[in-house]
Structure formats: C-alpha cells, structure tokens
Image (cartoon, rainbow, N blue to C red):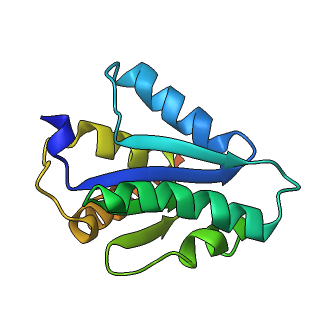
Amino acid sequence: MEEDRKVEVIIVSRGELANVLLNTAKRIVPRTFPWIRAVTFDWDTEMEDMKKRLKEEVERIVNDGKEVLILVDLFGSSEANAALSLTRKNVGVVSGVNLPMVLSIMCSRLIDLNMEELAFIVMQKGRSSIVYHNLKRGVTG
C-alpha cells in the first residue's frame, strides 16, 4: 500500500514550477500520491521564511518515522540552500528536478526503497531524459 512507503517527497521551487511539475505528472499518471507534495515560494520570500516552512514540512514527515527526499529546481538557489540546511541522515536533497524525475517517483512500485536508493533512481532518470536531437546526427545522449 502507498502509505507503507519509507520515503516521502517534497518538490520545492520559487514561482509555480513545483506545482506545475506535480500537476502535470498527475495528469499523466492519474492517481493520488499523498506522499508527494509541492512547496512553492513567492519570489520575494526571505530565506528564513523558506527554512521555517520547509522545516515544518520535513518535521511532520520525519515525526511519522519516514525519510524525506526534497527535489529542488536549481542548485545554488535560495530554495535549494534552504532545503540543504535541513539535510541529515533521513533528509536528502536532489537538485535539477524535471518532469521525468517526478514521473519516475510516481511510477515506482518499489515502496521498500530508502531515501538514497530513490534519490539514485531519480537522478538517473533525470539525466537519461536529457537527449540532444539533430537531423544530421540523430539522437545523442
């Protein structure tokens, strides 16, 4: 059952990117995913406010005995730095979130994965989905 998952996922961005990624993925895989949520920040949200809001989300999940994988939009961004400030044994961060990464989490039937295993799969999917196409050369990775 979905509630038996060891890891919950938070997609984080400024603007609406996190919501758009999650909602688009839900259109492709039309099921409910209570263990994946989007957290967005306005463009003028201060770092301390981001940290506070993310900490509340993370603590709620960790207090339920689960690990947290945070997917952020851009490495080095304020929201990524806020997420990185929360990393510890049961909280990890992956930057560069894209739609294939979110879909890989939704399509994963491997509920026994721990945070590091899930992060590895997500990163592999994110990288492998970036492909260069050219009429002369065909497809290259």
Q: Residue at x 75, y 62 (%)?
A: 49
Q: Give percent across and percent down for residue 52.
A: 65, 64
Question: Split into 4 quadrants, where in the image is the C terminus?
Answer: bottom left
Q: Residue at x 31, y 45 (%)?
A: 104
In this figure, what is the number of numbered marks? 0
Q: Is residue 123 above or below residue 23?
A: below
Q: Nearer the viewer, residue 74 or 139?
A: 74
Q: Nearer the viewer, residue 42 or 65?
A: 65
The answer to whether residue 7 is seen in the rendering is yes
Q: Is residue 84 above or below residue 73?
A: below
Q: Give percent across and percent down for residue 94.
A: 46, 67
Q: Give percent across and percent down for residue 44.
A: 88, 55
Q: Is residue 45 above or below residue 134?
A: below
Q: Residue at x 36, y 39 (%)?
A: 103
Q: Residue at x 39, y 71 (%)?
A: 91
Viewed as shown, does residue 113 lie left or right of 99? left
The answer to whether residue 129 is seen in the rendering is no
Q: Is residue 118 above or below residue 101?
A: below
Question: Split into 4 quadrants, where in the image is the N terminus?
Answer: top left
